[in-house]
Image: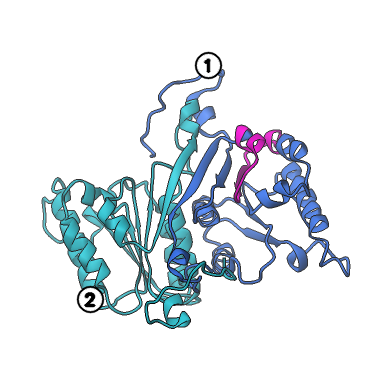
Chain colours: A cyan, B blue
Amino acid sequence: MPQGKPERVPDDGLTTRQRRNRPLLIVHTGPGKGKSTAAFGMALRAWNQGWPIGVFQFVKSAKWRIGEERALRVLGDSAEGGPVTWHKMGEGWSWIQRPGSEDDHAADAREGWEQIKRDLAAEAYRFYVLDEFTYPLKWGWLDLDEVVETLAGRTGHQHVVITGREAPEKLLSAADLVTEMGKVKHPMDAGQKGQKGIEW
Amino acid sequence: MPQGKPERVPDDGLTTRQRRNRPLLIVHTGPGKGKSTAAFGMALRAWNQGWPIGVFQFVKSAKWRIGEERALRVLGDSAEGGPVTWHKMGEGWSWIQRPGSEDDHAADAREGWEQIKRDLAAEAYRFYVLDEFTYPLKWGWLDLDEVVETLAGRTGHQHVVITGREAPEKLLSAADLVTEMGKVKHPMDAGQKGQKGIEW
């Protein structure tokens, strides 16, 4: 809450303002809904601040995030808030020009991560969404130690939100804010499949 | 996931398509972050479908949701998706013209609920966000039985997302989809207060 008071003030040599404005590494994990949806909801606030936003989408299905992508494109193009750049794995990765790479998802993920590293080093954005980024970590496609070190050592004022199930413990340890989305009840339990406007 | 298969198909007399497109009552609850943020993220998908969206904000602080509100207004006004109507408690409730009502939050909440009832009866929107709506329920300002009955009996194809901590059990029972946001780690634990672009 905006008016919330911290329970204790750490002895970290920072002023309250410095501490308040420290860039955050945020993880949304757990088996429930809302991990990515909440990340895109946060992007609305970043957009409202005029911050450049970079979305890195580590998923393949064309159906996924089409609503979020279109909304953020309209917002980014409106010139009323921050610009939005949307990167997709596979065909969508604009910087991957190699033919015949469709089966090599691991290579795609590694190239995606290389782009994120370049953008972090260049401080290209102030708000990053690394959507479903826990999967290439979980599957060993990326070096977890390198990822955590790179994120922890990022310069400037770059907030990073990572989404996906089963975030590795090392990533959680490095994060400033972790939310676990728990599944309490889901329509699929009652035989209901996903539907437009809700799941995509 | 869009391609997910339900584990069992219920004997409810509905076709798969009918079941799929059944309007949902969704609750985001729990002590963690992302309850409302995920609801506004879902609104991006509803907007992309061209659905009329009604937001009913049961909070008082002017700081809250300013990013989400501005983004959804820009989207709603863009004519590229569904229109967005944003209702606020207190001064913001456009239908409350009574002077001197600022201290009577319970009356404001009741009038807000009456507006929701009218809009549900008129099928005014296809996607409703009842933001922080669990609090007037928790505080006894609204009749829980009446709220649950009204929501369960709504006609047409109206999705409703309710956010807030400590959602009452009766509301959870009536819901189709419930996600519990759990707090794993929060910057306030490290003495960090909320910051712009992240909390608002």
Q: In this view of the protein, which residue sits in the foreground, A28 or A127?
A: A28
Seen at 57% across and 33% down, the residue is: B22
Is residue A162 left or right of A106 when viewed as pictured?
A: right
- Gap in angstroms between the C-alphas marked 2 and 1: 56 Å
Instruction: Kindly identify which numbered label has been placed on residue A191.
Output: none
Mark 2 and mark 1 on one chain: no
Is residue B181 left or right of A113 when viewed as pictured?
A: right
Q: Which residue is mark 2?
A: A121
Is residue A138 left or right of A162 when viewed as pictured?
A: left
- For disc 1, the chain is B
Q: Is residue A164 above or below residue B97?
A: above
Query: Which of the two discs, 2 and 1, sits closer to the camera?
Result: 2
Magenta stretch: residue B153 in it?
yes
Seen at 66% across and 61% down, the residue is: B86
Which element carries disc 1, helix, strand or loop? loop
Which amino acid, mark 1?
Asp
Q: In this view of the protein, which residue sits in the foreground, B168 or A19?
A: A19
Q: Quadrant of residue B145?
A: top right
Magenta stretch: residue B186 in it?
no
Which element carries disc 2, helix, strand or loop? helix
Q: How many marks?
A: 2
Seen at 73% across and 61% down, the residue is: B89
What segment is highlighted magenta in the picture? B151-173
Which amino acid, mark 2?
Ala
Instruction: Kindly identify which numbered label has been placed on residue B11.
Output: 1
| Residue A42 at x, y percent in the picture | 46, 63
Question: Within 10 angstroms of label 2, few (less than 14), some, or many (20 or more) residues?
Answer: some
Seen at 41% across and 27% down, the residue is: B6
Is residue A9 left or right of B96 when viewed as pictured?
A: left
| Residue B150 at x, y percent in the picture | 74, 37
| Residue B1 at x, y percent in the picture | 38, 39
